[in-house]
Every structure is written in structure tokens, then in C-alpha cells.
């Protein structure tokens, strides 16, 4: 058993050391620990939804699905894991924590803090999207597409980060004198691409309504613009065998 720290909490590094890591067929390393309320078959299918072309860039990552991950101390330089959920610990937990291990990085995802399969899958895929962009960058074809959309002032965006950086990348637009802030543009391109990857992977993993991604802090990207982005991502990273990409529009009545 892993070494206890306090209140039944365990050090993340110890959990990683003593928990068996599996590899999905696409090569992603993952493990499940504690009372995480996950079905093993469903978990593996979610992990395997990541196309092999994306998974290959994540060789130095391992994803640990634990009940709760918490920061230890004010400095937040250590991560603790709760083997089971309690409301007290749930109030202190965060969605995920990145932990440097021996020769790779562990991403500890709080399964019990994420209320349903949709939220858990999206948290995992957002992490995958950001990790892939950190390694591989943003393809030129995707950069061109989303910058054309930004210049055309297409409504909304896919996240708060993408929305804010997109607006900052074109200062002076409101006055009719737009210029380009290259630093903000780079941030926008990276945020929008990682978002698009996450939404694409979500569509491969579960059937969901686009409106479920809506947040109050920013307007959601127009559906036709998102469809353009997702079709390009699907072309760049075709689904693995057994997964299907499809966009279905709701009929108006």
C-alpha cells in the first residue's frame, strides 16, 4: 500500500510508483487508482479515442485517474491524492495536477470532482490537446483557417483563453484601425488548436450537443466555424479503428 501522509491522503509520487500503468493500443500510458467510480472498459475506450498520430507525441506523459488530487501547502509544490471522495476533500481538490516523476510527467485527474462522463472526458482531452500543442505546435493549415475566421470577425470562440487572446491579437478593430499583436496571435492560435483537438476527441468518445460547451464568460464559436475547424482536425488526425467522426445539425422545426 502507498504511504499515508495525513487524513488518509497519499503522495502522488508514491501512488505513481505503486500503481500499475497500462498502455492503450494507441500507446497512451494511463492508470486508475482508488475509488474513482470508473468502468475499466469505458476508461480504456476514452483513452483510445486519441488518434495514434496525436498519442505518439505524448510518450513522456502518463495519465492517472484518481478520486481527488490536491495541492499540499501554500507553495503548491507537492501533490496529494485521496483514495476516496469526501465532501471536505472535494472542496480542496482541483481538476488535475501535473507531477514531475522519474523520467516522465504524470497528470493526475480528479475523477470524483468531475460530475459525469462528459466532464471527465473533456478534462482529459483538454489536457491531451495542450500537451500535443506543446510538443508539435500548430499546423500551418489550421493557423490559416482560424486566422481567416478571426479577421472575418466570426462570432465567438471555443474557450476563455482563445476568446481573450483573439481579441488582444487585433487591437484597434473597434476603431476601424486593426493591427496585429503577434504575441497575442500566437497565444490565440495555440489555444484555439488545443480546444479544437479536445472537442474533436470528445466527439469521437461520446455523443454530445455542442451547446453543452457553452459558458457565460464568452460567446460560443458559431457552429459553422467550429465545423470547419473540426473537419480540418479530422483530416490531419483521422480516427482510430472503431471510432467515427460526424457532425450532425439539428433540424429546425
Image: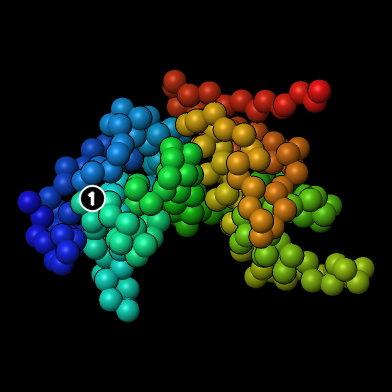
Q: Nearer the viewer, residue 103 or 152?
A: 152
Residue in view at x 30 percent, y 46 percent = 65
Instruction: Write down the quadrant of residue 165 in the picture.
Output: bottom right
**Quarter of the figure with residue 184:** bottom right
Work out whether 66 lies above or below 26: below
Q: Is residue 192 left or right of residue 136?
A: right
Residue 31, position in %: x, y?
25, 43
Q: Position of residue 84 (x, y in %)?
A: 23, 50
Disc 1 on helix, strand or loop?
loop
Q: How many marks?
A: 1
| Residue 185 at least partly seen | no
Q: Quadrant of the C terminus?
A: top right
Seen as rendered, the residue at the extreme bottom is: 74
- Above/below status of 222 relative to 9: above
Which residue, as the protein is rendered here, is positioned at the far front?
87
Q: Is residue 149 visible?
A: yes
Residue sitting farthest toward the right = 176
Vertical placement of 68 versus 35: above or below? Answer: below
Residue 198 or 96: which is nearer the viewer?
96
Residue under pointer 1: 84
Classify residue 14 as left or right of residue 100.
left
On the image, the x and y values in percent for residue 7 come to: 17, 64
Horizontal and vertical percent for residue 209? Answer: 62, 34
Query: Residue drawn at (38%, 51%), measured in percent from left and top?
Result: 113
Q: Residue at x 37, y 57 (%)?
A: 96
Amino acid at each position: 500500500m502507498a504511504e499515508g501522509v495525513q487524513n488518509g491522503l497519499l503522495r502522488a509520487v508514491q501512488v505513481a510508483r505503486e500503481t500499475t500503468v497500462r498502455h492503450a493500443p494507441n500507446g497512451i500510458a494511463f492508470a486508475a487508482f482508488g475509488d474513482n467510480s470508473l468502468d475499466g472498459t469505458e476508461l480504456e475506450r476514452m483513452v483510445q479515442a486519441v488518434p495514434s498520430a496525436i498519442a505518439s507525441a505524448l510518450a513522456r506523459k502518463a495519465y492517472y485517474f484518481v478520486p481527488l488530487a490536491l495541492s499540499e501547502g501554500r507553495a503548491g509544490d507537492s501533490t496529494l491524492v485521496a483514495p476516496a471522495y469526501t465532501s471536505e476533500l472535494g472542496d480542496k481538490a482541483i481538476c488535475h495536477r501535473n507531477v514531475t516523476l522519474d523520467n516522465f510527467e504524470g497528470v493526475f485527474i480528479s475523477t470524483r470532482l468531475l460530475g459525469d462522463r462528459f466532464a471527465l472526458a473533456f478534462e482529459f482531452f483538454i489536457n491531451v490537446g495542450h500537451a500535443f500543442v506543446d510538443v508539435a505546435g500548430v499546423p500551418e493549415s489550421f493557423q490559416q483557417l482560424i486566422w481567416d475566421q478571426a479577421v472575418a470577425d466570426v462570432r465567438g470562440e471555443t474557450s476563455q483563453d482563445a476568446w481573450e487572446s483573439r481579441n488582444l491579437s487585433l487591437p484597434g478593430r473597434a476603431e476601424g484601425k486593426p493591427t496585429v499583436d503577434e504575441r497575442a496571435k500566437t497565444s490565440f492560435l495555440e489555444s484555439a488548436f488545443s480546444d479544437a483537438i479536445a472537442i474533436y476527441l470528445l466527439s469521437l468518445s461520446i455523443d454530445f450537443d455542442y451547446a453543452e460547451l457553452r459558458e457565460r464568460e464568452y460567446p460560443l464559436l458559431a457552429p459553422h466555424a467550429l465545423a470547419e475547424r473540426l473537419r480540418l482536425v479530422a483530416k490531419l488526425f483521422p480516427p482510430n479503428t472503431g471510432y467515427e467522426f460526424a457532425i450532425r445539425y439539428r433540424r429546425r422545426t
